[in-house]
Amino acid sequence: MHAVKQAHLVREKTGAHVYELYTDIRASGKGYEEFYERVQREGVLFIRGRGAEVVMQGDQLVVKAEDTGLGRPITLPVDLVILSTGMTPRKDSEMVARTFHITRDRHGFFMEAHPKLRPFYSNTDGIFLAGTCQAPRDIPDTVAHANAAAAEVLSLLSRGKVAIEPLVAQIDSKRCSACLVCISLCPYKAMNLNGKGENVVEVNEVLCKGCGACAAGCPAGAISIRHFTDQQILAQIEGVLGT
């Protein structure tokens, strides 16, 4: 859509003939389809097909492309070629993700907790997403996204107290051998070696999300999830099966 907008401005300000080479048009935002149709009426020529190369023929720039609608190659003599580049995450996004324990998608953008129910939450409580750190966005979407994240931050600050989840890991200090396997497994850095001289691991309940990775990986079986123990799970299964 930013390419369509630039084509509209060039056509409006200069009256030049404008060609738009595209693979697919995704005009899914509010008013986007209407704007796309308006630019077509203004005389911008949309050609479905990729530009193969740009060459100089004498003093003339020529774009060689394929018109997939007509099923044949075309050449476009032009005065100016503008390449629409894609948006990529910042180079330091990986470092930020590791520092704050935020997951990323396959393209490197930060992932939301849920695309519909929690679109501006990260998977770490207290850290919110706004704008193009999550995905490529235009200005109206970025502003709306940032306003929602800011409102949630203000709501969080106005509470005075933070409620934590009851399902957190708990450690049996008598069985813990301080092998530190749980520390390496915990994605939220909620496990720490006791700093009081005791050779056991402690759980930071504020950081713990009860994912169960530590309980599953503990070789001594010293870790369980509070209110979600093996005995409780077995009792639920027996209740469902009616045994």
Image (tube, helix red, strand yellow):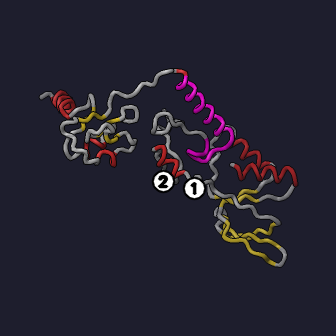
Residue pictured at 52% horizontal, 46% vertical: 110
Across and down, in percent, residue 76 comes to 76, 68
Q: Magenta stretch containing residue 240, yes or no?
A: no
Of callouts 2 and 1, which one flags the residue occurring earlier in the amino acid sequence? 1
Amino acid at pointer 1: Lys
Residue pictured at 85% horizontal, 49% vertical: 12
Q: Secondary structure at mark 2?
A: loop
Across and down, in percent, residue 157 comes to 54, 25
Across and down, in percent, residue 100 comes to 48, 43
Q: Is residue 154 above or below residue 44?
A: above
Pointer 1: what residue? 91
Across and down, in percent, residue 148 comes to 59, 31
The residue range painted magenta reads 131-157
Write down the quadrant of residue 49 in the picture. Answer: bottom right
Give the camera-side residue of 242 and 225: 225
Write down the quadrant of residue 63 in the picture. Answer: bottom right
Q: Is residue 44 left or right of residue 66?
A: right
Pointer 2: what residue? 106
